[in-house]
Amino acid sequence: MINQDSIVALATPSGAGAIAVIRISGENAINIGASVFQSVSGKNLAKQKTHTIHLGHIVEGEKVLDQVLVSVFKGPNSYTGENTIEISCHGSTYIQQQIIQLLLRKGCRMAQAGEFTLRAFLNGKLDLSQAEAVADLINSDNEASHQIAMQQMRGGFSNEIAKLREELLNFASLIELELDFAEEDVEFADRTQFYELLSRIEFVLKRLIDSFAVGNVIKNGIPVAIVGEPNVGKSTLLNALLNEERAIVSDIAGTTRDTIEDELIIDGMSFRFIDTAGIRETKDVVESIGIKKTFEKIEQAQVVLYLFDSLKFKVQSSEYIIEIEKIKNQFPLKPLVVVINKVDLLSENEVQNIKKQLEPLNVKLELISAKNNAGIEDLKKQLLSFVNTGALRNNETIITNTRHYDSLLKALEEIQKVNYGLQTNLPSDLMAIDIREALYHFGNITGEVTNDELLGNIFANFCIGK
């Protein structure tokens, strides 16, 4: 599967900038680079040591394309495990294209999406889960997702899976050995130790599977729906949270007729706030569609902020409490925060009265003035409290990849089958089948078991040049 041809691509984002980096990898990468590079000191690039940088010019015949720095990495001590050079040129799109076209004429071909990392995997520089973490690292847009991707890229998840797989493989070998001596009716695998191992593997798998709930929201952001009647300040709250005029604010009820979404990072965690159309009875067809979408967004959200106007709540509290109970009953598993807006217009006694009325509902309560930006920081802290980041703080392995999650679920199913077989004295040959399946799913995560279609699907999502 490993191509010996040399590939080239722009490793920095396309477009003009101060500098651009063009990467070449392959058996002839350094020789191709040497054929277009003139060192200012007259050095031959092909004879230079690995991990060195050289100043010179990219030339085509007598024509000088640019003054550049060329970094040399000789295989196997490179990212891809192959001979690699990186040309740091000026960031003009014209210069980038001129150099890449020259390298294509000299024998390179354009790299496919993720092909440099694919070669790193095929050459044993990374396992498959580490390679996938490279894409996650590039796409990380907050501290939490960056931390998880870094841990996975450094092999935290791989090491945990590899250790479990190795221990299971040792017992699998003993079980298989028993099959060769079936007529003698001997046991090479200590059943007590085997049971302890299966229990430990099951515990670790369940922990990793459970971590996906946290990992998935860290990777994709936590959706938070802001709901309530028209003109209670939902758009003002969104603007206050984002600290910018993102949503249109007016005194006209029903201004927001569609959902507005934007992202905010709070203490390293990404939240996706959804400002929805106001919930009310209306004959306006367009507004009705917006209200229908509001309930769809509540369905998709992980946290619901139910916003009320403090002055209206003061006189219609019994009616609003029924509405809060309806939302609670309709979405019982979703954290619900009741947010009372415009509290600056209430007296202290009125505020205390609202707190007492809401106490029996057992909901989280936040008192704010979105217009004056009061209480917004407390609301942000409340949102953070819904995210279980204990595992992240303790540097535990957290799963964010759906493919890994699926393989872990299948591995757990097979381990439970083996465990049941052990308890019911199932013949060794039948247990061996389930053990092989569990090993297959472990290997599928790290790439010890793989196929071209799987690799194609994974690396197609990478950017060109990585």
Image (cartoon, rainbow, N blue to C red):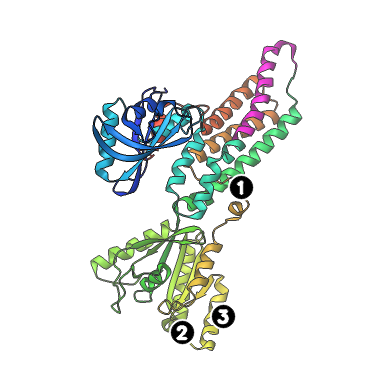
Q: Is residue 266 left or right of 202 when viewed as pictured?
A: left
Residue 434: x and y in percent read 59, 27
Q: Please name the amino acid that badge 2 sits on.
A: Asp
The residue under label 3 is 356
Q: Earlier in the sequence, mark 2 or mark 3?
A: 2
Q: In whole angstroms, how far apart are the C-alphas of marks 2 and 3?
A: 18 Å
**Residue 177 is drawn in which quadrant?**
top right
Residue behind mark 1: 396
Q: Position of residue 164 (x, y in %)?
A: 64, 33
Q: Residue at point 24% right, 66% down?
A: 285
For the C terminus, which image quadrant?
top left
Q: Which SS class for mark 1?
A: loop
Can residue 283 be seen here? The reply is yes
Q: Which is the main secondary structure of the residues drawn in magenta?
A: helix
Residue 174 inside the magenta-drawn segment: yes
Q: Is residue 399 visible?
A: no
Residue at (59% x, 23% y) in the render: 433
**Magenta highlight range:** 161-186
Q: What residue type is disc 3 on?
A: Lys
Q: Which mark is residue 344?
A: 2
**409 sits left or right of 96 in the view:** right
What crowding class fits label 1: few (fewer than 14 Cα within 10 Å), some (14-19), or many (20 or more)?
some
Q: In what quadrant of the picture does the N terminus appear?
A: top left
Q: Please give the count of numbered marks on the rendered protein.
A: 3
Quadrant housing residue 5: top left
Mark 1 or mark 2: which comes first in sequence? Answer: 2
